[in-house]
Amino acid sequence: MTAHDPTEAKREMLRTAINIAAFERPALEAREGQVWDTQELQRDFTVHGFLAPMVSVTRKADGKRGVLLFQHLPRFYFNFQPMWPAPRPGASNKGASA
């Protein structure tokens, strides 16, 4: 039995909307701001997983976790949204729940 994914229908609509009007890089940058190709993504982020049209990442520059959107062809990543605060250097996990 397959588990129900409550986000599947919304992700499918978003994925279709992104890919039906996929942009070349200059147009995507004009629309979304900073854009990464696959090599730039690997340089700037640690990738944790894909759930199209989103990818879960940690930004290497500051340790912020978040998500990026991506279009399939041409493959570009964009719209970084931080989801969790970056850990402070030297901060303790005291009192944090598992």
Image (tube, helix red, strand yellow):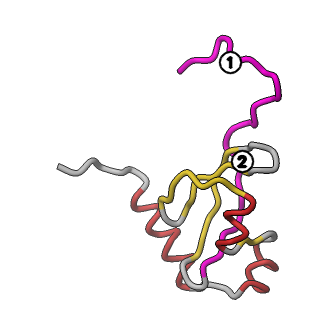
> Circle 1 sits on which residue?
93
Position of 33 with respect to 70 (left or right) is right
- Kind of residue at disc 2: Pro
For image coordinates 70% across by 88% down, the residue present is 24
Numbered circle sitting on residue 82: 2
* 59, 51: nearer the viewer: 59
Magenta span: chief secondary structure: loop
Q: Secondary structure at mark 1?
A: loop
Numbered circle sitting on residue 47: none
Cα separation between marks 2 and 1: 20 Å
Q: Is residue 23 above or below residue 67?
A: below
Q: Position of residue 95 (x, y in %)?
A: 65, 11
Q: Quadrant of residue 37?
A: bottom right
For image coordinates 47% across by 69% down, the residue present is 13
Q: Position of residue 43 (x, y in %)?
A: 73, 62
Q: Secondary structure at mark 2?
A: strand
Q: Quadrant of residue 79?
A: bottom right
* Part of the protein shown in magenta: 75-98
Q: Is residue 59 above or below residue 28?
A: above
